[in-house]
Image (cartoon, rainbow, N blue to C red):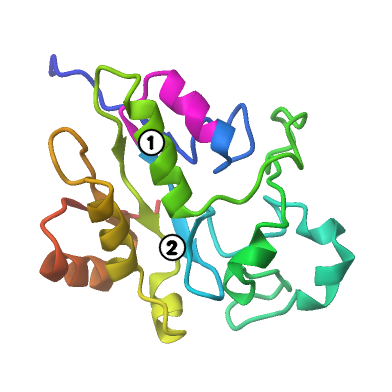
Amino acid sequence: MTDKKPIIIAHRGASGYWPEHSAPAYENAIDMGVDFIEPDLVFSKDGHLICRHDRYLGTTTNIADLPEFADRRVRKPGNLIPQWYAEDFSLAELKTLRCRQAWPNRDQSHNDQYEVLTFEELLQIIDHQASARSQPIGVCPEIKHAPEMLALGFDFLPAAFAQLTDHGFGTIERPTFFQSFDPATLRRAKEMSDIPLVQLIRN
């Protein structure tokens, strides 16, 4: 046993109370006193990092209710079911969507109220909230679908590292670590930065 205090990480923000990856989900998690915010990152069509658990927009946004996007649902290799993919939509288009609670047994009353956030917007939220706290707020992004995105010309590493650096992360005052299920991505990350890395393992 250890007497060290456990690290509290808010995966997708306070996603049991708010739609995941929405601004209030992150803000509420910080208000609860978490040590780290964990956003999952994917790309928009025009190269913006956005906070979504995966590429698929159908379960966590209202996109299925928007007729202007009905014909953008497609089947891609490796997926039997047609999906709306984040990388097929510009940031401007993604900003017209609203977040939804993905789990039916959780509070649905906040659905369709909050925008899809960019990673930059999340870091701005952390900047703002950190000024009111006496302890650091860390961020531990997880990049999703890295090999598939790299094949499409989207490289998470320089984009994410640049934004973390711009906001002063990677210090004792602003701790961060970087996560991925993909070993090749983490090997590349090790060559590019001294930010601590976490190899995720599927159960």
Relative side of 103 to 145, left or right: right
Q: Nearer the viewer, residue 71 or 24?
A: 24
Which residue is situated farthest in the top direction here? 3
Relative side of 121 to 141, left or right: right
Q: Residue at x 64, y 38 (%)?
A: 19
Q: Residue at x 73, y 32 (%)?
A: 110
Q: Residues in magenta?
A: 25-36
Dividing the picture into quadrants, the one containing residue 21 is top right
Query: Is residue 30 found inside the magenta-colored segment of the image?
Result: yes
Mark 2: secondary structure: loop
In the image, residue 116 above or below residue 47: above
Tell me how many marks there are: 2
Q: Which residue is mark 2?
A: 144
What's under tag 1, amino acid-wise? Ile
Mark 1 burial class by Cα count in 10 Å: few <14, some 14-19, many 20+: many
Residue 164: x %, y % from top left: 28, 52
Q: Which residue is mark 1?
A: 126
Relative side of 102 to 166, left or right: right
Is residue 15 something one can see in this rendering? no
Circle nearer the viewer, 2 or 1: 1
In the image, residue 201 above or below residue 84: above
Mark 2 vs mark 1: which is more N-terminal? 1
Q: Nearer the viewer, residue 162 or 175?
A: 162
In the image, residue 123 above or below residue 146: above
What's under tag 2, amino acid-wise? Lys
Residue 31: x %, y % from top left: 45, 20
